[in-house]
Amino acid sequence: MKKLSPTLLICLIFLLPNLVMGVTFDDLVERNDLYYEKFTDIPFTGEVTGKEQGSIENGKREGAWISYRENGKLRYEGKYKNGMKDGAWFSYYKGNYKDILEKSAWVQNHKNGIVWEYIE
């Protein structure tokens, strides 16, 4: 039976928690508009888990992202392209309204082309 080399064993010890638990934003730092794992100089590539979930490629958010509030309810969802918000974004707010018309969904178009849709 072959033995694991000490170097391979050390790598497995450090990498296994990230593979099993995933990386959260608490594990990342932002420098010059790029995300890095703490204590590294290589832009992060991989999946982010936790309250904010999505993918990062070469330090930039990419593809579908979703965020949850502390109570587990949906906060927002949308897509990123090359680190920039892209297309429609949906943000979910809680609150009470007196006017029934304000309870329906509404859309807000920003000057930069990003669309936010608010749903109670």
Image (cartoon, rainbow, N blue to C red):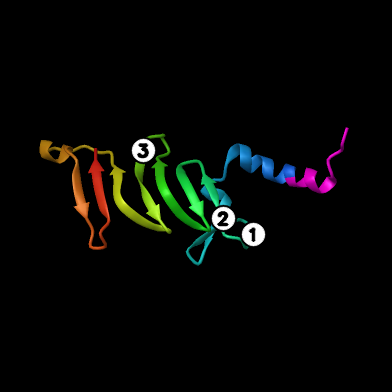
Residue 78 in the image: x percent, y percent?
Answer: 35, 47
Quadrant location, the N terminus: top right
Q: CA distance from mark 1 to mark 2?
A: 9 Å
Image: 116 above or below 34: above
Q: Which residues are magenta?
A: 1-11
Residue 32 in the image: x percent, y percent?
Answer: 50, 67
Magenta stretch holds residue 74:
no
Q: Who comes first in sequence, dot 1 or dot 3?
A: 1
Task: Locate residue 89 relative to residue 99 in the image: left or right.
Answer: right
Residue type pointed to by label 3? Leu
Image: 55 above or below 60: above
Marker disc for residue 74: 3
**Residue furthest to the front:** 1
> Which SS class for mark 1?
loop
Quarter occupied by residue 38: bottom right
Residue type pointed to by label 2? Phe
> Which SS class for mark 3?
strand
Q: Are marks 1 and 3 in contact (CB under 8 Å)?
A: no
Quadrant location, the C terminus: top left
Instruction: Tell me what residue is drawn at x 65 percent, y 40 percent.
Output: 17
Instruction: Tell me what residue is drawn at x 36 percent, y 38 percent.
Output: 74
Residue 4 in the image: x percent, y percent?
Answer: 83, 40
Q: Residues within 10 Å of mark 1 (few under 14, many from 20)?
A: few
Q: Residues within 10 Å of mark 2 (few under 14, many from 20)?
A: many
Q: CA distance from mark 2 to mark 3?
A: 25 Å
Task: Locate residue 111 relative to residue 72 in the image: left or right.
Answer: left
| Residue under pointer 1 | 40
Image: 119 above or below 28: above
| Residue under pointer 2 | 44
